[in-house]
Image (tube, rainbow, N blue to C red):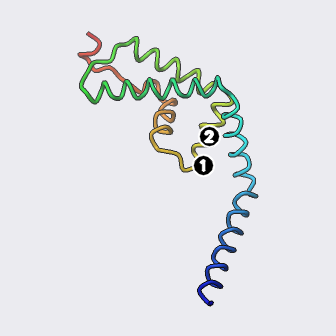
């Protein structure tokens, strides 16, 4: 019987911890940002396109294939439009507070850099 009591105590404390986290103002803001993003199909589409384009360019680089200036410019324009979308900005900020896959936040965090994908001298030829 003591095992059942101990498990009940652990479950109760776990539930209390979860409730405390849910009541934190920071969590509530993060949740609203995610909910807003999930309700905005345009922001989701923008996000998906940037992720796909980033994956494609990264894959090309890993394969040793040249990136064209047009590909880089198109990616940067799509990424800039995404980070200038207020709903997407909120989602990106929420990602920094939640345990999302590192890949997504890495691509978007590069938005502060002039260019995430730099053509090599041979790519520019």
Vertical relation: 74 (above or below) 43 = above
- The residue furthest front is 1
Query: In the displayed structure, would residue 72 be above or below residue 125?
Result: below
Which of the 4 image quadrants contains residue 18? bottom right
Q: Residue at 41% across / 18% down in the picture?
A: 72
Q: Position of residue 79 (x, y in %)?
A: 53, 24
In the figure, is residue 104 to the left or right of 7?
Answer: left
Where is mark 2, residue-wise?
93
Label 2 Cα crowd, 10 Å radius (few <14 / some 14-19 / many 20+)? some
117 or 88: which is nearer to us?
88
Q: Residue at x 68, y 67 (%)?
A: 17
Cα distance between the residues tagged 1 and 2 = 7 Å
Q: Position of residue 50 (x, y in %)?
A: 50, 25
* Element assignment for label 1: helix
Q: Residue at x 33, y 28 (%)?
A: 59
Answer above or below: position of 6 versus 106: below
Q: Is residue 70 left or right of residue 119?
A: right
Which residue is denoted by mark 1 in the rendering?
Answer: 97
Mark 2 lies on a secondary structure that is helix
| Coordinates of residue 53 in the picture (x, y in percent) | 44, 23
Please identify the quarter of the rendering in which residue 12 is found.
bottom right
Q: Nearer the viewer, residue 84 or 44?
A: 44
The residue that appears at 63% across and 32% down in the rendered structure is: 89
Looking at the rendered image, the quarter that the N terminus falls into is: bottom right
- Are discs 1 and 2 less than 8 Å apart at CB? yes
The residue positioned farthest toward the bottom in the image shown: 2
């Amino acid at each position: 019987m003591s095992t059942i009591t101990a498990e009940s105590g652990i479950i109760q404390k776990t539930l209390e911890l979860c409730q405390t986290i849910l009541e934190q103002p920071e969590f509530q803001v993060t949740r609203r940002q995610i909910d807003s993003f999930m309700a905005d199909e345009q922001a989701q589409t923008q996000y998906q396109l940037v992720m796909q384009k980033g994956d494609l360019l990264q894959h090309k680089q890993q394969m040793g294939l040249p990136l064209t200036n047009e590909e880089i410019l198109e990616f940067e324009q799509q990424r800039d439009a995404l980070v200038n979308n207020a709903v997407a900005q909120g989602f990106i900020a929420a990602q920094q507070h939640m345990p999302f896959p590192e890949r997504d936040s890495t691509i978007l965090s590069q938005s502060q850099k002039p260019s995430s994908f730099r053509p090599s001298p041979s790519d520019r030829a």
